Amino acid sequence: MESVPRRTIVLSAFACSPLWGSEPGVGWHWAVQLSTRHDVVVLTHGYFRQHIESHLAAMPAAERPRRLTFEYLTPAQFGLHPHRQLNSRLFYMWWQLCARSRVRALCARQRVDLIHHLTWGTFRFATFLGGLGVPLVMGPLGGGDVAPMRLYKGLPWSVRLREALRALSLRLSRFDPMVRRALGTADLILCKTDDTRRALPGRHASRALLACEIGAPEVDLQIRSGIDAEPALTDAGLRVRPFKLLFAGRLIGLKGVLLLLGTLKLLRDTGHAVQLQIAGDGPLHGVLARQTQQLGIADAVQFLGALQRQVLLRHYGQADLFVFPSLHDSSGNVVLEALSRGLPVVCLDLGGPKHYVTPDCGVVVSTQGLSRSKVEQGMARAITELILDPARLRRMSDEAVRHARAQNWGACVARAGIK
């Protein structure tokens, strides 16, 4: 096996935390995995200093990454609360601009072989780390995924307007001079999805490769999904307990929960005893709760609210199927989380989740040229087939665990090919 020479990498991760998921979790995991093969200096927002230092101090000495160091950058804050800084696009661009001088100083005082811009992982917000005399890698980047507006039917007009404006912004990003300059200075551009790669200005396509952003967490077999190969039936041939669907995510338009409620209505109307648990909260909670009343399925839907991680893990272990009809998530952490716990997944052929689901551990439902009602029918058919074939569902559960183990963080970073 060809050995990879150890290099010094400056990893720009505005968001980086061992305690949080999403973007901060991506920053942390990539830093740790890259440091197994290289010397890594992470530049991150000063807010995460306490997260990182307390976590490292609590680790056994033998387990601490030895070739991983951190630089913290907190530029002028303009009176913003730290949480506002972390979510402000304007502040993020200011941080990126300040990061250039910090990285230039790093390159002046030590050898740097590679600069890697990681978070935020979206191509529409530029980095200024190119042109420093060191090769630049960007990504994995997302932000290029757009769902057909017909799938937002039934959502409040404000949500549909926001999505329409986002789609317009995405198209205009191709002509943004800062975006074009940042992409032009990159030696390698990693993209989370095909849609993002296609969204890049054409001349950059030759330097763009597909790469997964996230890895599966370690599996705790104690909370693995307890799917029965042969569920208990009554004398009338009905299941003793309802078939349990689980969704986890923020209650916002892009997550597709309205599609899921329509799907549940179809399942119930055809006589299937199905229950849906919704883990998460957000601005559409009231809209969705009213929709369950209008559809006559309120007795079959349980809104769990925002859950602590350990509580959510228990719900994975009690469900039969994870359903995630997201319309343009570029990754889908909860998909890998569900698979790692033996929970098969049904998702749409949009965005990133489809890249993590195979026919052996789930179902990817087509949306191509279909209306919202047709997509709901497709989801209902997929779920019905699994309800009626518990042995297949059990095989999927076993394969989900194996598949997730092969998608761990180490494999995710290694497959990106940063050498």
Image (spheres, rainbow, N blue to C red):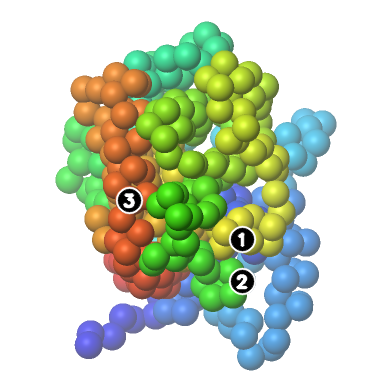
- In the picture of the structure, the residue carrying the numbered disc 1 is 313
- In the picture of the structure, the residue carrying the numbered disc 3 is 388
Q: Quadrant of the N terminus?
A: bottom left
Tell me where residue 282 appears, x and y as whole percent: 65, 31
User: Distance from label 1 to label 3 (Cα)?
Assistant: 26 Å
Q: Residues within 10 Å of mark 3 (few under 14, many from 20)?
A: few
Q: Check residue 69 in the rendering and tell me which mark sits there, or answer none.
A: 2
Taking the image as shown, residue 281 lies to the left or right of residue 234, namely right
Residue 103 in view here: no
In the depicted view, which residue is nearer to us: 305 or 319?
319
User: Distance from label 1 to label 2 (Cα)?
Assistant: 32 Å
Taking the image as shown, residue 75 lies to the left or right of residue 327, namely right
Q: Earlier in the sequence, mark 3 or mark 2?
A: 2
Q: Dividing the picture into quarters, in which one does residue 153 lie?
A: top left
Q: Quadrant of the C terminus?
A: bottom left
- Element class at badge 3: loop
Q: Dividing the picture into quarters, in which one does residue 310 lie?
A: bottom right
Q: Earlier in the sequence, mark 1 or mark 2?
A: 2
Q: Earlier in the sequence, mark 1 or mark 3?
A: 1
Amino acid, disc 3: Leu
Q: Residue at x 78, y 61 (%)?
A: 50
Q: Check residue 231 in the rendering and tell me which mark sits there, or answer none.
A: none
- Contact? badges 3 and 2 (CB < 8 Å): no
Q: Nearer the viewer, mark 3 or mark 2?
A: 3
In the depicted view, which residue is nearer to us: 351 or 308?
308
Tell me where residue 200 appears, x and y as whole percent: 28, 34
Amino acid, disc 2: Thr
- Contact? badges 1 and 3 (CB < 8 Å): no
Taking the image as shown, residue 323 lies to the left or right of residue 312, namely left
In the depicted view, which residue is nearer to us: 361 or 27?
361
Amino acid, disc 1: Leu
